[in-house]
Every structure is written in structure tokens, then in C-alpha cells.
Image: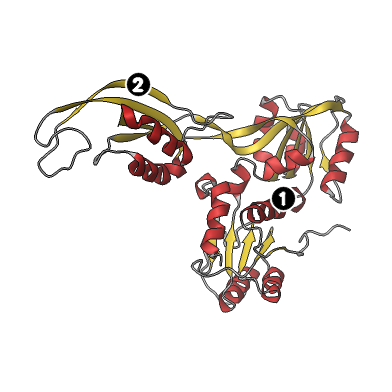
Amino acid sequence: MIQISDILKEIERIAPLSLQEGFDNAGLQVGDVNRTATGAVLCLDVTEGVIDEAISAGCNLIISHHPLIFKPLKSLSGNTYIERCVMKACRNEIVIYSAHTNLDNATEGVNYKLASLLNLQNISILSPQKGKLLKLSTFVPVSSAETVRIALFDAGAGNIGNYDMCSFNTQGTGTFRPSEKTNPYCGVAGELHHEDEVRIETILPSFLKAAVTRALLSAHPYEEPAFDFYPLDNVWNQVGSGIAGELEQAEDELSFLQKIKNILNVASVRHSALTGRTVRKIAICGGSGAFLIPETIACGADIFITGEAKYNDFLDVEDKILLAVVGHYESEICTKELFYDILSKKFPTFAVQISNTDNPVKYL
């Protein structure tokens, strides 16, 4: 049997909650995760219809992209669909969980999925996150250095871009004097000891600090390992907002706009004035991504595809880029497939159902 908490841990392994933006409310919305999961419904938005789907299918877990509870609730009177959803979920013991901007910002997240649909190459993050990395420094006897390094790598440390198992190692001499209350790995209680040691330095995302610490303490032979974590101000190029990539060959603007419409299956594509240039470098941000227009222009993109933009955004881009707006729902509907792929790979026999709830925005 699979616990709901185990399913949510897998979602957070791909999209850690620490990656969400400060305004967001991703994570558990409603319910008790310490129960056996009977099935999951995957959706973009939680509505009463989605909860009815879960009840009908016998599923006690709903995983959505957009958080059901975005602002604090001041009452539960049933006056809004949000309140009614919370009440109905509680009555039917259904857990509601959301992975929002943490999934947007994650490696292989929403924007990566959109980039893959358009067959983009040479992909990079448009606006990488900063201040989310730590440097670990620890001191290990020479004979145990490799064992400790591997344990740290297995816990997720040592990844830089497309390289893993990254570390820097300096050999020196450590000194310590065990007290009479110790049972030292080396040395004698009450006597000063000199030991040939390796200083291991490696890098890790801050959300892995607890896991890496456990791995270090488990693999390190000393009773009292010495180690330090240093916060880094580095840009983390593997996570952040938006994606930039390239088409294999440049395409005509109108032809590419039609291609977007067909691939994303959207009713319409709103766009700024054509620039008269071909498009090769593409920038993408699902949802409300207009805040990334300056970064899009700075990276030299020919077109920026997003879900929402304000009226003035179409003027502000002038002839610097082509702005294409496809609709918020349409730009993020692929989230359902992302959730499905994550869960089906880890839990192949678990009942997962993609919601049939349609776009709340209708077109005449």
C-alpha cells in the first residue's frame, strides 16, 4: 500500500517547495497525508467538479498546479467555490495538494515541457534563481574520504550544471584530543592526536541540507565530525523562471505563430506587431510571464510565448521582440501530464486519473 505522504514526497523530490516564489502557497492545502492513498486526480485548478470526479473514482488525493487556497480564509461558510471545495474535501476525507511555482521553477518543470513540445534546443533558464545553494566543507581521515564523498553524492550533493560528483579535496593534518568520555575512531583518550585528513568541499541545493547532513553523519567514521555549511550568493542556472531555447532552423513569424496555435491546441494567439524578422531563439514562460519581458529582450530572443500579458505589454515590446500570448490555461495544461509522468514512473501500479475539467475561460 502507498501512503499519500510518499506520493507527495515524490512530487517534492522533483519540485521542492523551497523553489516556490515568496507570494505562492504551494504544498498541502487540505487533509491528512498520513493515510493510504486510494488514487489521485490530476488537475490544473481545483473545482467542485474535480472533487466530484475524485469522489466518483474513489480517489482520496487531488494534485493541482494552482493552489486552491491562495489567500487566507476568514470563514468556511460556503459562500465561494474555494470554501465549498474545502468543505467538500474535508467531508469526503480528500487530500488536496498543489505544486505551483515550485514546479514552474524546477528543472524539467512546466517550461521545459513547453520547450520540448516546440522541439527547442540549447535550452537555458531565462531568469535563474539566486541564493539557493550551499557549500559543504568537512574533514575526513584519508582512508574514509572516498566513502564519505560517495555518500554525499548519493544524497544529492556535487551537482554543477551537467556535471555531477563534483568536489574539491585538500589533504592536510587534523589535530584533536579525545576526552575520557569518548570512544575515538583513532587516537587515545586524553592524548593529543595528529591524523592525515582530507578536506572535502562540495555544493548542494539548500533544500537538501538535512538529507546531506544525515548522509555525512552516517558515513563519517568520527564520533564528532567537523563540518560547515556556507550560504552562496551564486546564481543557480538549473532552476528559475522561464526558458530560452532555439529552433533547429529559423522560421517565418506568421508560420511560427500558426505552429504555436496548432501544437498547443489554442483557440487563438494574441500577438504584438510583427517585426518583419524570422524567429530562431524562443523564450517561454507558462502562466503569467510578462514580468520576464526584460530578460527575454536581454537574452536576444526573437519571440516570447506566455499565457498572460497586459495591454501595455504589447506596446512596450515595440519592435524588439514578438510577443505571443496563448492563454493561461492553455500554457499550463501540460502540467497534468507532468504530474502523470512523475507518479507513473515511481508508482506504476498506482491509480492516477487526469481530470476532465475544462478551461474556465470560454471563447465565442
What secondary structure is marked by label 2? Answer: strand
To which residue does mark 2 refer?
170
Give the mark, 1 or 2, whose residue is nearer the N terminus: 2
Residue 127: numbered disc? none
1 and 2 marks in contact (CB < 8 Å): no
Given residues 69 and 165, the one toward you in this image is 165
Instruction: Locate the C terminus by quadrant.
Output: bottom right
Q: Answer with left or right where residue 327 lies relative to residue 144.
A: right
Dot 2 amino acid type = Thr
Given residues 101 and 290, the one toward you in this image is 101
To which residue does mark 1 refer?
332
Q: How many marks?
A: 2
Dot 1 amino acid type = Glu
Q: Position of residue 16 (x, y in %)?
A: 53, 48
Residue at image point 68% right, 26% down: 299
**Would you identify the image quadrant in which residue 199 lies?**
top left
Q: Is residue 64 visible?
A: yes
CA gap, disc 1 and disc 2 = 47 Å
Given residues 125 and 343, the one toward you in this image is 343
**Would you identify the image quadrant in which residue 218 lies?**
top left
Q: Position of residue 216 (x, y in %)?
A: 36, 40
Q: Position of residue 234 (x, y in %)?
A: 48, 29
Residue at image point 71% right, 76% down: 56
Q: Is residue 168 above or below residue 38?
A: above
